[in-house]
Each structure stands twice: as structure tokens, then as C-alpha cells.
Amino acid sequence: MLINSIRSHMAEFGIVALIGVPQVKKLLRIIVDTDDARLPSLARICLESLARQFLPLHNEINVAEKRIHAWHLSNEVSRRLETTPGIGPITASALAASITDPEVFKSGCELVAWIGLVPRQTSTGGKQRLGKISKQGDQYLRWLLVAGAMSVIRHAKRRGTSQAWLAGMIARKPTKVATVALANKIARIAWVVLMCGETHRPVAL
């Protein structure tokens, strides 16, 4: 949120940076450079307040991520989950910590519903209609799975994919729809990995 705020305020003055923390640091250097005339003095004073918050917050996030990675490496379940495309150490550790007993869910579909990655259903005149995802359940897990799915889709668009299902989904559906569908599938695969006690097998995707 802080990064987005800095980027948006700087963009108001025509100073735009690419996405990524290293690019934001370029904006921070402009903010502290009093000789850079692109920023009015009053705007610079306001932006300096945001800039001062960035470094300590960035350091705290790095420390937290290192702790998560250390726990991930020490946990066999989390390491197995990471073998699933779209699931990295942070998502794997979150799933392993949140779903300590996968047998609570009768199927991967139940897990997906618990996370909130299923369409909201309404019925009129005896006909069922599917809407947007319900967004009920675990918001953090849902966000992580969607972010992971988006990463897979971006990679597939740039370099292609050998997975016919994914290629067809990308070709037929809008990116957001394809992303949620893939996040749904990743969650179901994660349930299988949890239940079977094995690593992911690529043919499942």
C-alpha cells in the first residue's frame, strides 16, 4: 500500500517508475534530491513522510519473510506443497499452517469452497446461475492462491505452456476469469498433495 501510494503521488507530477521495489527506490532518490525541480517543495515535504516509512517497513517485511522461509524449510508438508505450480514458500507455509487436518474436507472442492474460490450461486425460475466468487472463507489463502495463479498465467503467456487445459483457458477466457479458475485448480491439487502425503505430479495440472 505504501509503495502504491508513493508511485501514484509521483505519477501526478509525471514521474513514473516500473513495478518493483528497486524501481520504487529510484523514486525515493528523487524525493530526497532537493535539486530535482520536478517536485514542488510542498509535495516533496509530504512525500518525504512516506519515504521515511518505506525503509523500516521494507526491512521488517524482509525479516518476516526470512522467518517464514526458515519454517517452510523445516516443515515437510510445506515443502511438498511447494512442488505444486503456483505455490511458493509463503503460500505453502500458509496452507500447511492453516490446514492441519485435510481429512476435514471430503474433497478438494470442499477445500476450495472453504477458501472462497467458488462462484456464488443464485437461482431464479428453477435455473441456477453462477456469479462472481463468493469471497467467503479464508481471505489470505484466497489472495495467495490467486496471486500464484496469476504468476503461472503470466509465465504461460510469455513462454507458452505444455498444459492443454491451461492454454485453452487462457485462449478462451478473460485473464481474471482464467486466474480464478487456475487458483481453484491449484487449491484442489494442494488438497490431493495433503491427503496423499506425496509431492505434486505435473500431469495433474
Image: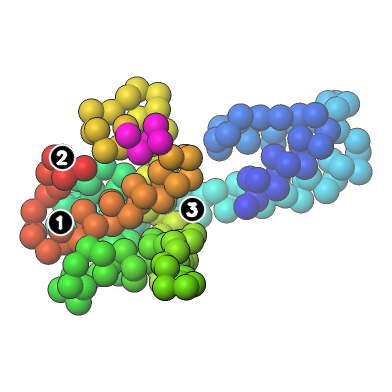
Q: Quadrant of the C terminus?
A: top left
Check disc 1 and report the residue beneath it.
193
Task: Check disc 3 and give the amino acid type.
Answer: Ile
Nearest-to-viewer mark from 1 and 3: 1
Label placed on residue 81: none
**Does residue 95 appear in the picture of this structure?**
yes
Camera-nearest label, 3 or 2: 2
Looking at the image, the residue that sits furthest to the bottom is: 104
Q: Nearer the viewer, residue 1 or 131?
A: 131
Q: Earlier in the sequence, mark 3 or mark 2?
A: 3
Q: Which residue is mark 3?
A: 61
Question: Could you say whether the residue bearing mark 1 is in a helix, strand or loop?
Answer: helix
> Does 13 sit above or below residue 90?
above
Q: Amino acid at mark 1?
A: Val
Residue sitting at x 76%, y 35%: 11
Q: CA distance from mark 1 to mark 3?
A: 29 Å
Mark 3 residue element: helix
Question: Which residue is depicted at the point 40% across and 28% down?
Answer: 157
Label 2: how many residues lie within 10 Å, few (<14), some (14-19) or many (20+)? few
Residue bearing mark 2:
202
Looking at the image, which is closer to me, 22 or 181?
Answer: 181
Q: Position of residue 105 (x, y in %)?
A: 21, 73
Within 10 Å of disc 3 (Cα), the crowding (few <14, some 14-19, many 20+) is few
Q: Residues within 10 Å of mark 1 (few under 14, many from 20)?
A: many
Relative to residue 70, is residue 36 drawn left or right? right
6 shown above or below 95: above
Q: Nearer the viewer, residue 186 or 60?
A: 186
Percent position of residue 36, x then y: 83, 26
Q: From mark 2 to mark 1, how far is it between C-alphas?
A: 12 Å
Segment colored magenta: 168-172
Residue 139 seen in the figure: no
Labels 1 & 3 near each other (Cβ < 8 A)? no
